Amino acid sequence: MADPTPVIDDLRAESEELDLLVAELSPEQWALATPAPGWTVAHQIAHLAWTDHSSVLAVTDHDAFSREVEKALAAPGDFVDEGAEDGARKPPERLLADWRTGREALEEALRAAPEGARFPWYGPPMSTASMATARLMETWAHGMDVAEALGVERTPTDRLRHIARLGVRTRDFAFGVHGMSVPFEEFRVELTAPSGELWTYGPEDAADRVSGPALDFCLLVTQRAHRSDLALRAAGPDADCWLDIAQAFAGPPGKGRQAKGDTP
């Protein structure tokens, strides 16, 4: 069983990096629009705080989390936006403090989780490492939205390896959530890490292949960029189709981002 400590450590580092980006923002900057329609910088951080809170309940209080699931089922199209909206109404200093408190509580809960533990979620149950990976993915992706709103270019790190691995592992989910037949054969995926290391997944002799920068692959599977704006290459019809529908996050198919230059 994989040791979850490295991904928990990287989740902490990713959160701290985003914290540095928002800690000194003015009220006007907290209100800046981000690429997510209707969401400001405050909405992005509020969403992270809300999801961290849900994650803590999933790890530490299954009954309380079950009640949260019931709320989600009662308003499946609204509960995520409502959680972000509620948090975004708070004064920035309160929102920032709540996010910090929540993510620290989640880190403590994940580190204290017994070996082999599995936690309920809005989708399939998650292991400790999977929960930490999902939180890292969201922290990075929403952090990219915040950076874009602020006009800041973030330097990618090899923490992306967790997101890249999740993107590969969710291939079948992406096909299924689009109502498409899941390819029978594995794909070969070869990604160049920010450090220059080559990350590989799947059999070397696979007929369908994907290759390119790990950053671009992570932007694709979190739907933070349109495929046409990324330097990813696909060989084989199934791999080519995957790059059009890939998503590493749970829930219905995302709308994705428009290609640069496209008129909204």
Image (cartoon, rainbow, N blue to C red):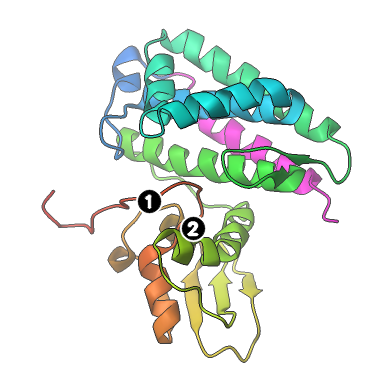
The quadrant in which residue 206 appears is bottom right
Q: Amino acid at mark 2?
A: Cys
Left or right: where does residue 2 sit relative to residue 213?
A: right
Task: Name the residue rendered at 40%, 19% in the picture.
Answer: 25
Q: Position of residue 173 (x, y in %)?
A: 52, 61
Task: Name the residue rendered at 56%, 76% in the picture.
Answer: 189
Mark 1 element type: loop
As displayed, is residue 220 above or below residue 236?
A: above
Looking at the image, can residue 45 be seen?
no
| Residue hosting label 2 | 218
| Residue hosting label 1 | 224
Q: Which residues are magenta?
A: 1-24
* Main SS category, magenta section: helix
How many tags in the picture?
A: 2
Q: Position of residue 92 (x, y in %)?
A: 43, 12
Q: Nearer the viewer, residue 192 or 3?
A: 3
